[in-house]
Amino acid sequence: MANPTTIRTGASGGTEVTQASLPNTTGTITVPRRHLLDLDDLTFDEINDLLDSASGMLEIIGRDIRKTPALRGKTIITMFFENSTRTRVSFEQAGKILGADVINVSASASSVSKGESLLNTVKTLQAMQIDALVVRHPHSGAPYFISNHTDAAVVNAGDGTHAHPTQSLLDLFTVRNHVGDPSGKKIAIVGDVLYSRVARSNIVAFQKMGAEVVVSCPNTLLPDGWELDTTLGDETGFGGLRLANSVDEAVDDADVVMALRIQQERQEAGHLPSLREYSERWGINSKRMALAKTDALLMHPGPMNEGVEISSEVAHGAQSVVEEQVRNGVAVRMAVLYTLCAPGKSTRIGSGEDG
Amino acid sequence: MASDESKETHLKARKLAITGGRVIDPAQGIDRVADVLISNGKIGAITESSTGDVPREYVQIDASGKIVSPGFIDLHTHLRDPGQEWKETIVSGTRAAARGGFTTVCAMPNTDPVQDTAAIVEDVVRRANSDGAVRVLPIGAISIGQRGKRLAPMGELADAGVIGFSDDGNPVADANLMRQALSYSVEVGLPIINHAEDKKIGAGGVMNAGTVATRLGLSGVPVEAETVMVARDLYLADLTKARLHIPHISTIGSLAVLKSARERGVDVTAEVTPHHLTLSDEWVYGLNGSVTEAVGSEAYDTNTKVNPPLRSRADVEAMIEALKEGLIDIIATDHAPHAATDKICTYNEAAHGINVLETAFSSVFQLVVNGKISLVRLIESLTSSPGSILRHDLGSLKNGFPADVVIIDPNSRWIVDPEEFESKSVNSPLSGVELTGRIVHTIYQGETVFELNGDHIEAGTRS
């Protein structure tokens, strides 16, 4: 059994708290934590430990009676200021399988348009003795703001155009289960890099795990200062990221091809002439998949615009792991919630000791 | 003499002698240890240092080891009064000014109601004269309601005492209206001060576009949003032969077009804020943050949100250089107090603006400490240079000028604590930062309006 670890309290101050470690870990967690805001502050080993834990969780999901008492008596609130079905349900399912009480709060950012209200919302929930707050917010940094004002564990379920760490964990988990160690593998990310928190978190995550990440998108959807046909330097915070000159270059010999959702709004804001042109030039179809490795994985964080960024043929083809990503999402979120909320070392899951 | 008594005495003394300080008055080319004599609210003479031996009728303020400068002039202050008195008032804002060494502040017209008619301006002037700790010179709106549609009555506003026109915060987007505003202002003889930002290019960005914005997932405003409008305004000023004052300049591109306009003889002046001289956009990542490290809990500090946004290090260095060589004329604060509710929120939701008055001098004094600019040039940019833009008898210790004087302890080290501000608001990104150099005494029209408590100065005691 792994040693208990202490929780990093840097975000909100306070004293160090002892907490049970992950199940099935090798005891390598060195930086204890209490929030999951992005993957950039997790070590290589911490990420691997979470993925190991997710494997155990996946086994639980596969049982006839998928319920454990691991988080019994714990309260998790999902607070979504932006519409989402899959992520919210995924967290809810994860929390419920672990035996936690899960309360879903949905609020539009417009109804809570002033920060004082967001602050008050958080303080109000805090007063009800909650253990974890799962937050989806249209503003980048919102979970960081919230984590500075609550004692509960904060899980970032997607903030603005900044990060979506549990999506990255499930993507890493999916890749690891099919391709093995991502180190040295070529990951092609095709789509709206400028506005995509999935792209940002996945670039950080896959690079941290040693993969070679290449992105391709229209120049209008690259962040300011990023030039096509270059490789970013370390000073950008995304050192080593290749900005392919064409989608063909990006997917060429790739181990994983990841298509990102393209929003209709991009066309309206003048980033794109039309979705049709986008589909022609950046859409992932069987012709483009043929440029990748024979057994390359096709991924998409969902929801998909079939026929735009991804053709129906490949979306539901043999290389697609899109549905598996959804299933894995529950497993990694269980691992995350367990890591942050487990009451003590008395309960271990995924090891046969639970009920 | 008991010091309490003498303190009472010098606060209202008719005659004051500030002795033994290093007197810096760039307008007169003075930089030497001397005594400054004040009588009936006016500057009298600057005499050779008496080492304490001043005429009996003078109350002495010992400034030995200190710097004595004309009171600072801020061409860009938001007093929020009338309309947003929970953020700042004429009283609190002028007290903040006094604590920061400013004896003149020019109040931006974006109050509620907007300063677009004489009646509203006269109300501010009247209340400032009766309640203000320091001088308030109002700035009138360029357009009615700052809406950018119709010109405000500039002549009427000038008669009411405004020193220039600005729709600050709301750039004059319509190029023809800007042209007419400049042209009309020629007869009035006052500068047009246009917040230069093409909001379309900015596209709703909340910080400077670049590496930090990308890493934090915050939408960025490219430097060009400012540069293109500065260029437009300079060409329109050239066309109309009007006076243009560029507020809070912040980009390398703006400097390039400014330089070229100067060379063509355009009648233009420019200001830079203390924060654009000292803070880069990396502060949004956290105090001295680096994008090569993980985003931490100190990132997204809403007190760094300001318009124009904090720029890149290269821009900051270029601003310092331009101020040093005089391409940028003055430092102005853009003091923008905001209530906690406007700042304790997400970065997107937060209001733009930094509370600057009380940290302004000390923050830019770090540039002197680090050898990046001379003390004389720094003081010039806070005194005689803005004074000459105002064309008032201000910003110098010339005989007969209002006795506006600030005494600075160049060696005092202090930690910024916004809770101690005279300002009603605390929105400073410098909270907890240690600075060297501090305002210890501010005199406005011969009266002490701020004096630092503690051991820093023995002002008011006769030796």
Image (tube, grey):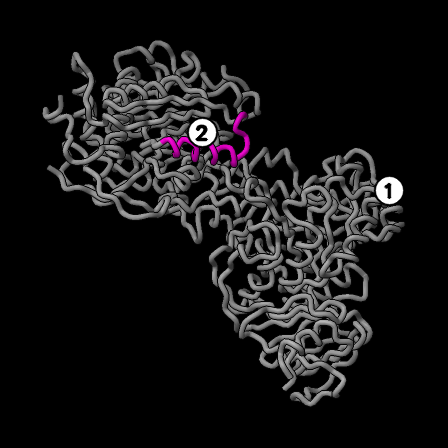
Q: Which residue is mark 2?
A: A137
Does residue A185 appear anywhere in the picture?
yes
For the stretch drawn in magenta, the main secondary structure is helix
Determine the chain carrying the residue at label 1: B
Q: Which residue is mark 1?
A: B153
- Residue A118 included in the magenta stretch of the image: yes
Q: Tell me the quarter of the image containing the C terminus of chain B.
A: bottom right
* Quarter occupied by residue A174: top left
Camera-side residue of B261 and B202 = B202
What residue is rendered at 75% in x and 56% in y? Answer: B131
Vertical order, B332 against A328 (above or below): below
B104 sits left or right of A332 in the view: right
> In the image, which disc is placed on residue A216?
none
Q: CA distance from mark 1 to mark 2?
A: 45 Å
Q: Tell me the quarter of the image containing the N terminus of chain B.
A: bottom right
What residue is rendered at 38% in x and 12% in y? Answer: A311
- Give amino acid for label 1: Pro
Does residue B211 appear anywhere in the picture?
no
- Give amino acid for label 2: His
- Residue B218 included in the magenta stretch of the image: no
What residue is rendered at 82% in x and 74% in y? Answer: B400
Q: Secondary structure at mark 2?
A: strand
Callout 1 crowding tier (Cα within 10 Å): few <14, some 14–19, many ≥20: some
- Find the magenta span and give its range: A111-128
